Amino acid sequence: MCRLYLQYNKNPIAKQNISKLVHFLETGTPKNPDGFGFAWINNLTQNWSIYKNSTIYTEDNEVQKIIDFIIESNIVVAHVRSNNNPDFLKNILHNTHPFLHETQIFCHNGSTRRDEEFSTYNAIKSKINEKYVPLIQGLTTSELFFYLFLSIKDAAIHSKKYELYKDVLHDSVEEMFYCLQDLKLKILANFIFADDNYIIVTKYKTCNLITEASKKLFYEKTKDEICVTSFPIFPNMKEFMDNTIMLINIKTGKVEESFISCFIVQPI
C-alpha cells in the first residue's frame, strides 16, 4: 500500500524537525519499493516544488540535497509508492507521486475497483475536463483523481455561487466522490491536495464499502505543527475518522475538520 506524509510547521522545519520525515521514509520504504516523491514550498519562488524518483529513496544520491532544501520550508508532503498492479506499472516516474499542476500538488493512497467487468481508468478519464486530458502522463487512477478534482473545482469557481474559497474546496471534494460513486466504483481514498492557500487531507470510503476496513490515516497536532501519516510513526498519533476532511490554512495555520457524507445528494 502507498503511504502518505504531511508536515506543516508555522516556522521553517529546520534540521531538528526533519527527523519525522526521515523516520517515515525509513519505516515506509521497505514495503513500498516502487518510487517516492516530495513536494515543498520553495522559499525563493513561494511556489510548490517537487522531486520524485521511480526507485527507492536509499538508492537515490540526491535525497540529502533535497532534504536540505526542504528544511528551509515550513511544509513538506511525501509519498512512497507500492504498486499492486502488473509489473509494467512498477517503477515508472510518471506514476510516482506527488503530481504537480501549476501551483497545485496532489498525492493519494487507496484502492479503486468495481465488481463488474469495467475499464475504471477510462470511466474516470471521461469525467475530466478536456483541457486537462493532454496533461495526463501516467497510468494511475491517482493522477486521474487529481485532474478530476481540478475539473470539478474549476466548475465550482466558475459557478460564482461561493463567497469563500475554502467552501469551493470542501464541496469539490464531496462532488469528486459523488462522481466516482455515481460510476459505481468502490473507493477507499486518502489524499493530500495543496495549493497556495490551503492544504486538504481526506480519508474517505464510498458507502458501498461501509463494512470494509478503511485505509488508515493518522495525525498529530500541536500549536506549532501538524503531522499526517499513513501509519503511526509516533505513539500519540490519533486516527482520522472515516469520511472526514481536514482543511489547513497555509497562511494562518488554522485547521478545520468536517464530515463528508458517503451519500451525496446532488452534484454541483
Image (cartoon, rainbow, N blue to C red):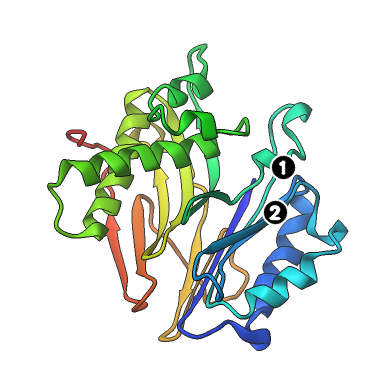
Q: Judge from the rendering whether residue 231 lies leftward or rightward of residue 217; answer left or right.
A: right
CB of mark 2 within 8 Å of CB of mark 1?
yes
* Residue type marked 1: Leu
Residue occupying the point 55% across, 83% down: 12
Residue 93: image tag: 1
In primary-sequence order, the first of circles 2 and 1 is: 2
Residue 63, percent across and down?
78, 66
Residue 57 occupies quadrant: bottom right
Q: Looking at the picture, tell me which residue is in the foreground, 155 or 220.
A: 155
Q: Quadrant of the C terminus?
A: top left
- Disc 2 designates what residue? 52
Front residue of 188 and 99: 99
Distance CA(mark 2)–CA(mark 1): 7 Å
- Residue 181 visible within the image: yes
- Categorize mark 2 by other alpha carbons within 10 Å: few (<14), some (14-19), many (20+): many
Taking the image as shown, residue 228 lies to the left or right of residue 127, namely right
SS under mark 2? strand
Dividing the image into 4 quarters, which one contains the N terminus? top right
Front residue (pair 124, 239): 124
Q: Can you name the residue that lies furthest to the top here?
A: 117
